[in-house]
Image: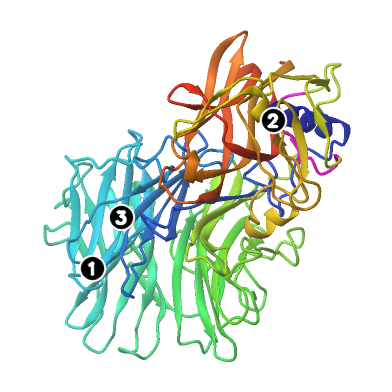
Amino acid sequence: MPNNRLLGAVIASAILFLPPCFAADDVPDPAFGTKGIAYLSIDGVEGHELRVGAAIALPDGKLLFGGSRNKLIEGNPDPHMRGLLARMNADGSVDAGFGHDPGNPGLVVLGDLVTGTQQQQVETMQRLADGSILVAGTAEAFGPLNGFALKLDAQGAPDTDFGTFLLAKSRLHASAVDSRGRILLAGEHMANGLAEGVVARLTPGGRLDTSFGSDGTGVVFLAGTAAQGSSYLSALTVVGGDGVVVGGGFESKGEGLGTDFSLARLDADGRLDATFAGGGWRRFRMPGDTSTFNGIDQIQPMPDGKLVLAGHREDAASGVYPLLMRVGADGDADATFGDAQTPGYQPLVVAPTAWNRYSSGLVRLPDGKLLLGVTYAGPGKQDFIALRTSADGKPDADFGSQGQVEFDLAPDGIYSNLTAVALQDGHPILAGSVKRSLSSTLVDLGAVRLGDGAAADDAIFADGFDDGPTELLTDYDDLAEGFKGLSLHHNGITYREVNGIGGVFPDGSTFTPDDVGDEVVIEDATFLFGDFPAFGSSPNVMTFGKTFMPGPNLSLGPLVRATLDLDSPASAARFEAIFYENGPWGGIQLHLDAYRNGDLVATDVVTLSNLGGRDNLTTRTFSVTGATFDSLRFHATFDGQPSAPRVMIDNLRVTPASRR
């Protein structure tokens, strides 16, 4: 009754030792992933490295990430990157229903978009009105440079009618959709050895909109004179009347002589809007600043028509730093924003030992505050860093340390690099790439969800107070190693039907009830956390059956089945599992089923890898949600018959159903 006891302990601990059921807004939200952090991995066969270029929260709360998958080929140092989509459930678990490769659930690797190019990366995404996804980015390296855009259905399949739009000799970094469903793309186009900022508009069907721009091509170039240098655009937003504001950098003084901030507004026809910044296109630096390296990375429109810009500038003494700026609807600096010494601008000091620091995402929070993600490079370890300011750009002293928080998503690895920021129902989502092991080539996708700081419902009172859903956590760390039991009723949960039946293994051999035992076991598996630092919480986990060895060992017991009945209905449950796959286990299915009055109402299932060879350990989060249930069953099958893989579980979370 692995799962049963598991759950029982969980609920018990959660109620008896109930901490505040909400997360402060500067710490990871414990209701997300494991202690607020979630990972999504690739198998090391189909690919090795996951990179994140964009993140959005879908209407159902699921999280969609766009980026690239790189495959490492022995003896070949060249990149083998393809566009990537990845999806997590709202709680940070892998969305196993997304993707077509059972060995890599939650991932969709795009096909070869530009033949011959080895570096293909999704840099921007938009969810369209019909629920489809627009992705855009750049294909380059060892082949023709092209910006690309394509439309995918909600499950990641390409829309063949839309096709793949290519903009030759260009990179595409930003996108938006206007009120008529037309698609705006921004980046830079290479011409005569220089880059020139480019804006293109597509029809909803994926064709260049020839009504945009002055020459009937649907493309607008922001290029300087012969005495000026290159221009690029990395940010784009749609404003009133389907106008378009773009931002980036421009070499106003000539090629190689430094970049200025570049900000332009086009009207709905693609012409520079003369009412904006005295002609439609503003190139500028922070007043009195000697920086020769400046650029705009994100644009966030405000409800009053003003625009907050996240960018970067170079401090000659210590490298590149991010900063925030705000301009009015007319494009001029808003002197009410930022530091009093630099009206309109808020320079930000972050990661002082690093060399270069750039803004990697900007969102406006529900209370009007601003949250900025930072990516950086330098000596030492790289972590996720986010900053929060007031609506007027002042660092928020109530957020972390002097307005900054830092999270190490690779405590035993090399780096975690924050490259995208999104909002999920008011909660900031910080996402990027994480190399969690010194000895592995794998780079995972990692995400952190911050709490919203809101007061939580009180699950103890039943006298009319609001007692809506509150997730309850049990990590087994308060229990004693070596605890065993056949059945138990504890804190509203009855645990029963632990194993007690025979079955088959994939190699054709069989087992009896006596072979697998019928007990739930609390194990100290301290050694496990060194190899899988993102799994569970040290020291204790739960396992099943006969296996038990005292001490900080690794002793995974057999799971055939475990049932737990809830005295009160629940609306969601999830836990982390670690199990052997490959070897003699490949092809076994692990199921988490939820029942209501005996009827199956929700399920989660994973098929153990069947790659042959020795036993390999892997981790996975199991979850059921979207229904009300009163019983759970965690069980294993092979070809429809009971089976018994070796399994441990930890950090069980249960959300009681609302009693309203």
| Whether residue 233 can be seen here | yes
- The residue carrying pointer 1 sits among few (fewer than 14), some (14 to 19) or many (20 or more) residues within 10 Å by Cα, namely many
- Could you tell me which residue is drawn at 51 percent across and 42 percent down? 94
| Whether residue 457 can be seen here | no
Q: Look at discs 2 and 3 and give the one toward the viewer.
A: 2
Of 540 and 534, the residue lying toward us: 540
Q: Which residue is mark 3?
A: 136
Instruction: Determine the residue located farthest toward the left in the rendered image.
Output: 216
Q: Earlier in the sequence, mark 2 or mark 3?
A: 2
Q: Quadrant of residue 121?
A: bottom left
What residue type is disc 3 on?
Ala
What residue type is disc 1 on?
Ser
- Could you tell me which residue is drawn at 36 percent across and 54 percent down? 46
Proximity of marks 2 and 3: CB atoms separated by less than 8 Å: no
Q: Dot 2: what SS?
A: helix
Q: Which residue is mark 2?
A: 2
Q: Earlier in the sequence, mark 2 or mark 1?
A: 2
- Could you tell me which residue is drawn at 46 percent across and 79 percent down? 294
Of 21 and 517, the residue lying toward us: 517
Q: Which residue is mark 1?
A: 170
Q: Quadrant of residue 173?
A: bottom left
Q: Main secondary structure of the magenta part?
A: loop
Q: Dot 3: what SS?
A: strand
Q: Earlier in the sequence, mark 3 or mark 1?
A: 3
Residue 585: % across, % down: 50, 39
Tell me which segment is drawn in magenta: 467-479
Q: Is residue 628 magenta?
A: no
What residue type is disc 2 on?
Pro
Position of residue 302 relative to residue 173, above or below, is above
- The residue carrying pointer 3 sits among few (fewer than 14), some (14 to 19) or many (20 or more) residues within 10 Å by Cα, namely many
Residue 352: % across, % down: 65, 80
